[in-house]
Amino acid sequence: AQSVAQPEDQVNVAEGNPLTVKCTYSVSGNPYLFWYVQYPNRGLQFLLKYITGDNLVKGSYGFEAEFNKSQTSFHLKKPSALVSDSALYFCAVRDIGSSSYKLIFGSGTRLLVRP
Amino acid sequence: NAGVTQTPKFQVLKTGQSMTLQCAQDMNHEYMSWYRQDPGMGLRLIHYSVGAGITDQGEVPNGYNVSRSTTEDFPLRLLSAAPSQTSVYFCASFAGGRTYEQYFGPGTRLTVT
């Protein structure tokens, strides 16, 4: 069965420093991977996706993610964090075994960027 | 476009009461889904629909019903609310094809006492 794991409940980083939010996956076949962000009292917003192609994927708000097949990872990165990046981040994988386009979500990682 | 809208934003129910959470989208998306979000558990799929008149169960369907009479609307019904259904509920829509990006509504925070 497909799954994703986000090993960190919370990541703390100082503004201006680089940030990494970790995600590992387990899928059979080629993974379709996503990152979503949730700001307080809001729905999830799409950040970026990896379907195929370059291992480094660029997304919204200056975020990027690196797909690493050998390590089964899809870590979210940003070179210079902003206080406004503080939010809840979810990694997800598409359940390719069904016709539902179901997304299987990780448990989420709270990012806190301190001034 | 309003995107995906959900009503109400907040709701408190007593155990055994029923209610309907509304979801609508104006993007002409074929696929719509309902998720629930619980602390430390990410989002879990309740029910989904691949088009008007077609629905199916997700991961945690018990206690919920859905219908899809139009492309735009996908209401979620709680038949007899239980405290275990206290959660934040999100509706999402998706165009299909190779876009893969799902659009989420702002959520409904439900408390069952």
Image (cartoon, coloured by chain):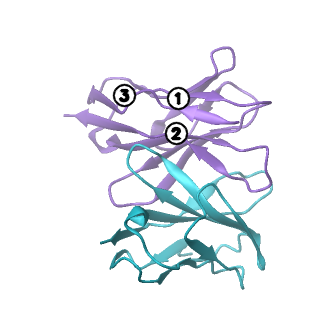
Chain letter of mark 2 equals A
The tag earlier along the polypeptide, 1 or 2, is: 1
Residue A29 position, x and y percent, is: 80, 30
Number of residues whose C-alpha sits closer than 10 Å to that of mark 2, classed few (under 14), some (14–19) or many (20 or more): many
Number of residues whose C-alpha sits closer than 10 Å to that of mark 1, classed few (under 14), some (14–19) or many (20 or more): many
Mark 2–mark 3 Cα distance, whole angstroms, equals 24 Å
Q: Quadrant of residue A53?
A: top right
The tag earlier along the polypeptide, 2 or 3, is: 3
Residue depth check, mark 1 versus mark 2: number of the one nearer the observer: 2
Give the residue at x 67% y 80%.
B67
Is residue A11 positioned above or below A100 on the image? Answer: above
- Marks 1 and 2 close (CB-CB < 8 Å): yes
Instruction: Please name the color used to draw chain B.
Output: cyan
Mark 1–mark 2 Cα distance, whole angstroms, equals 8 Å
Q: Secondary structure at mark 1?
A: loop
Give the residue at x 27% y 34%.
A113
Residue depth check, mark 3 versus mark 1: number of the one nearer the observer: 1
* Residue for badge 3: A80
Residue A9 position, x and y percent, is: 36, 33
Number of residues whose C-alpha sits closer than 10 Å to that of mark 3, classed few (under 14), some (14–19) or many (20 or more): some
Residue A23 got which mark?
A: 1
The residue lying toward the viewer, choosing from A18 and B24, is: B24
The quarter in which the N terminus of chain B is drawn is bottom right
Q: Chain letter for purple? A: A
Give the residue at x 53% y 29%.
A23
Name the amino acid, label 1: Cys
Chain letter of mark 3 equals A
